[in-house]
Amino acid sequence: MNLYLKTATCLTLLTAMIGVVHAHGGEDHGDAGAAQTLVGNRPQRLPDGSVFLPKVAQRRLALRTVMAEMGEHPQTIELNGHVVMNPSAGGTVQALLAGRIEAGPKGLPLPGQTVHRGELLAYVKPAVGSAEHSGQLSQLAELHAAHTQAEKNVARLHELEGSVSRKEIEAAEAELASIKGRLAAVTTGVEGRDALLAPVSGAIAMTNVVAGQVVDAKEVLFEVVDPNQLLVEAQAFDAGLVDNLAGASLAGDGSKLRYLGGSRALRDGALPLLFRADGPLLKLALGQPVKVIAQTRTMRKGVALPAAAVVRNPANEAIVWLHTAAERFVPKPVKVTPIDGTQVLADGVEAGARVVTDGATLINQIR
């Protein structure tokens, strides 16, 4: 009987232990629990959203990380802008009179062609009506006849020099000079052309002419710019920015811009702000739209990261990938604000965290 009770007691204890083991199996063990879901030693997305990435795969993907550091950075604002001409290093060529385009000795210039100040670009043959042209030809014929007669009078008086007064000879010579001047002026009006010259040295940015084209007065025919001195004009809607900007850069390539100043008068509802690049804007075209990251004098604390470290999750939220363990990467939602064209201020990242900079997009694609 005692043996029977001992056996029953052992069975009861064994059943209780089995129940405890089954109840314990559903608990969360953190990394250990995540490790139990791994399928082989390959890159994979874990149920908690983190990514398992073996060291071999990390080297193949050329991953790079940085240690997040807290610091003070200028508060920035993103402005819409476009490339404009420097008024001191560019200009337009316009027709003074209506007429027909004629090419110069070297032909008409092409877009992108380098020209020098004062170089001949084209001619404009003035256009006149038939009645006006007939009147000019008639006046020209009269002046030719008068010029011939005046030359004969001067020659005859010189032959009679000594028998005629010097005063009569000088009067005849003065009349001849006057007729020559009038004849030259009328000839220029009938046969002359208006020369179009380059206002500055640079490159032809725009040409709007072909040989034989009829143009109106004041029509813009050429634009000449110096590619090394282009400016960027941005539009601001806050008048306080005019005196509160410290610098700027172009979004994308991070080219530094020097703030020149802002207008005090609205244009199309915005205040124009002018910037000059420290280096030439050779990669940009006149009138090309750009994004300007303007830095104010107001400072704010935060973690600065390369813009390449920020990616988007399936919910289109901005995230960064934190390297939390040797082979584990965890996504971290952040709120980003541009600092310049290449760096952003990430709110939500703590100082000391190791953030993936190179290869974040590749980790984001692992499923």
Image (tube, grey):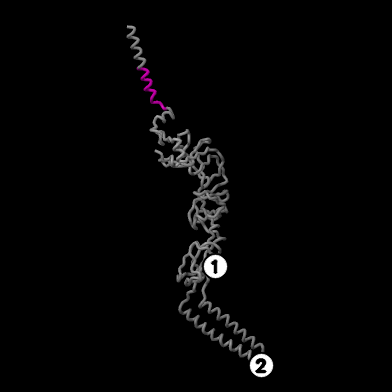
Q: Amino acid at mark 1?
A: Glu
Question: Measured from the top left, where is residue 336 in percent x and y?
Answer: 49, 42
Question: Measured from the top left, where is residue 38 in percent x and y?
Answer: 39, 32
Magenta-colored span: 15-28
In front of the other: 148 or 174: 148
| Crowd around label 2: few <14 · some 14–19 · many ≥20 (10 Å) | few
Question: Measured from the top left, where is residue 220 in percent x and y?
Answer: 49, 65
The image quarter in which residue 46 lies: top left
- Quarter of the image with the C terminus in it: top left
Question: Measured from the top left, where is residue 342 in percent x and y?
Answer: 51, 46
The image quarter in which residue 36 lies: top left
Q: Are marks 1 and 2 in contact (CB under 8 Å)?
A: no
Q: Is residue 133 above or below residue 52?
A: below
Q: Amino acid at mark 2?
A: Ser
Query: Which mark sits nearer the N-terminus, 1 or 2?
Result: 1
Element carrying mark 2: loop
In front of the other: 260 or 329: 329
- Magenta part mainly helix, strand or loop? helix
Q: Is residue 139 above or below residue 270?
A: below
| Crowd around label 1: few <14 · some 14–19 · many ≥20 (10 Å) | some
- Quarter of the image with the N terminus in it: top left
Q: Which residue is mark 1?
A: 119
Which numbered tag is attached to residue 215? none
Q: Tag count in the figure?
A: 2
Which numbered tag is attached to residue 163? 2
Mark pair 1, 2: CA separation: 55 Å
Q: Is residue 24 magenta?
A: yes
Q: Is residue 106 above or below residue 347?
A: below
**Residue at point 54%, 38% (across, down):** 69
In this rendering, which labeled residue sits more in front, label 1 or label 2? 1
Element carrying mark 1: loop
In front of the other: 100 or 58: 58
